[in-house]
Image: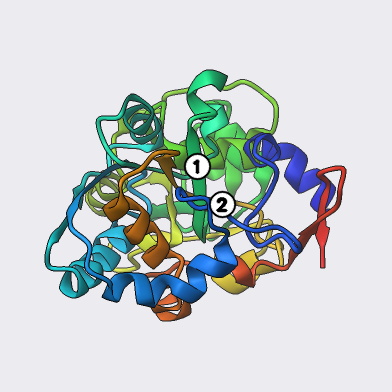
């Protein structure tokens, strides 16, 4: 089952799997591994450090980064951390160009950048998040198969009655090209198939999807779990499996992504310290789950020498 799931997620294979993989460690910008940075993260926050940390990228976990940044700046008043969530592609392009010190992404840098750009970056995998389809409050469908999702998001299925709902046109709200959330969703639903269907609208950010879904009838889109809002829309099952973090950790819910924070190999001390903080117990032990994410250490997967990922 897992072999099939990961063949759909090409972006996972490109960078060699999850940070939670047994026997592997995350390499920090300063060359230390995840075990050391996690243990020393709190100490790093307490040390005297100054400078400016900037980021851009995935809007899916911008709230997590912002919340962590507030805590980090409280402990380090001489550091400024600020940024935006303009999509994974823009974040990766910006960190590669040096216009920000951190690029946040739902996908591995190899999927968005040239090889000579990637070689100068260091990946920090800070969390895992589930992503799933959401529908308007008036839609009566509460479960869709991957084949049905493929039909809807390719434009082949256009009416809710075709999937068990009312006789009404399906309004497809997509994300723009460059979105890591879109790349994750399409990899899970379409696998290796190319898809260029735009839908009725292409939106920039997860927050834009939240807003539009809350004011549009008969619509469908997709969001990461941390942006689910049952006061505005309904998150629905996929293949009969509920979109819950517990179902992501054992890979029974198939649409999920690792959240990456990339920096350059020669990142400044303030950036290094903040990334160490993101991997520390202060963030991983509580804040990640509070914000609707999953610590990378909770994923029940292992990776063998050939790169194949399977259940623990």
Left or right: 73, with 254 as reference point: left
**Residue 253 at what x, y percent from top left?**
65, 60
Up/down of 103 relative to 304, above or below: above
Query: In this rendering, does residue 112 appear at all?
Result: no
Q: Write down the quadrant of residue 115 in the picture.
A: top right
Residue, x 54% and y 35% (percent of image)? 152
Q: Where does the image place residue 112, in percent across and percent down from the top left?
A: 49, 26
Q: How many neighbours does mark 2 have within 10 angstroms: few (below 14), some (14-19), or many (20 or more)?
A: some
Front-lying residue, 261 or 144: 261
Q: Which label belongs to residue 122?
A: 1
- Foreground residue among 174 and 220: 174
- For this rendering, which residue is in front, 69 or 257? 69
Q: Is residue 234 visible?
A: yes
| Image mark for residue 211 | none
Is there CB contact under 8 Å for labels 1 and 2? yes
Quadrant of res 13: top right
**Which residue is at a point 55% across and 51% down the rendered structure image?**
257
Of the residues under marks 1 and 2, which one precedes in the sequence? 2
**How far separated are the C-alphas under marks 1 and 2?**
7 Å
Horizontal relation, residue 236 to residue 55: left or right? right
Residue 76 point in image, percent of width and height: 19, 69
Q: In this figure, which colouring scheme has been used for the structure?
A: rainbow
- Numbered disc 1: secondary structure: strand
Name above or below for residue 246 compared with residue 302: below
The furthest residue to the front: 48
Crowd tier of the residue under label 1, counting other residues whose Cα lies within 10 Å: few below 14, some 14–19, many 20 or above: many
**Left/right of residue 215 with respect to residue 116 in the rendered view:** left
Q: Secondary structure at mark 2?
A: loop
| Residue designated by label 2 | 27
Quadrant into which the C terminus falls: bottom right
């Amino acid at each position: 089952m897992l072999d099939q799931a990961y063949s759909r997620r090409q972006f996972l294979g490109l960078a060699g799997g999850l940070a939670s993989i047994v026997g592997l460690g995350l390499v920090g910008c300063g060359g230390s591994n995840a075990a050391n940075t996690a243990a020393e993260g709190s100490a790093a926050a307490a040390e005297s450090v100054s400078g400016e940390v900037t980021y851009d990228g995935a809007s899916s976990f911008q709230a997590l980064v912002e919340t962590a940044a507030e805590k980090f700046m409280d402990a380090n008043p001489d550091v400024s951390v600020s940024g935006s969530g303009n999509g994974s592609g823009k974040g990766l392009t910006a960190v590669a160009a040096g216009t920000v010190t951190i690029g946040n992404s739902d996908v591995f840098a190899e999927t968005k950048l040239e090889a000579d750009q990637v070689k100068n970056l260091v990946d920090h995998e800070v969390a895992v998040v589930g992503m799933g389809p959401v529908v308007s409050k008036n839609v009566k469908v509460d479960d869709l198969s991957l084949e049905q999702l493929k039909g809807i998001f390719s434009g082949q299925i256009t009416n809710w009655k075709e999937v068990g709902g009312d006789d009404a046109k399906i309004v497809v709200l997509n994300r723009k090209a460059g979105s890591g959330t879109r790349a994750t969703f399409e990899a899970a639903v379409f696998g290796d198939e190319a898809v260029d269907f735009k839908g009725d609208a292409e939106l920039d950010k997860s927050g834009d999807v939240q807003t539009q879904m809350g004011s549009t009838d008969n619509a469908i889109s997709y969001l990461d779990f941390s942006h689910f809002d049952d006061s505005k829309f309904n998150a629905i099952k996929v293949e009969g499996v509920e979109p819950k973090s517990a179902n992501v950790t054992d890979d029974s819910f198939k649409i999920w992504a690792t959240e990456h924070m990339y920096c350059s190999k020669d990142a400044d001390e303030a950036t290094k310290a903040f990334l160490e903080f993101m991997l520390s117990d202060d963030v991983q032990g509580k804040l990640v789950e509070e914000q609707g994410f999953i610590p990378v250490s909770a994923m029940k997967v292992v990776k063998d020498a050939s790169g194949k990922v399977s259940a623990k």
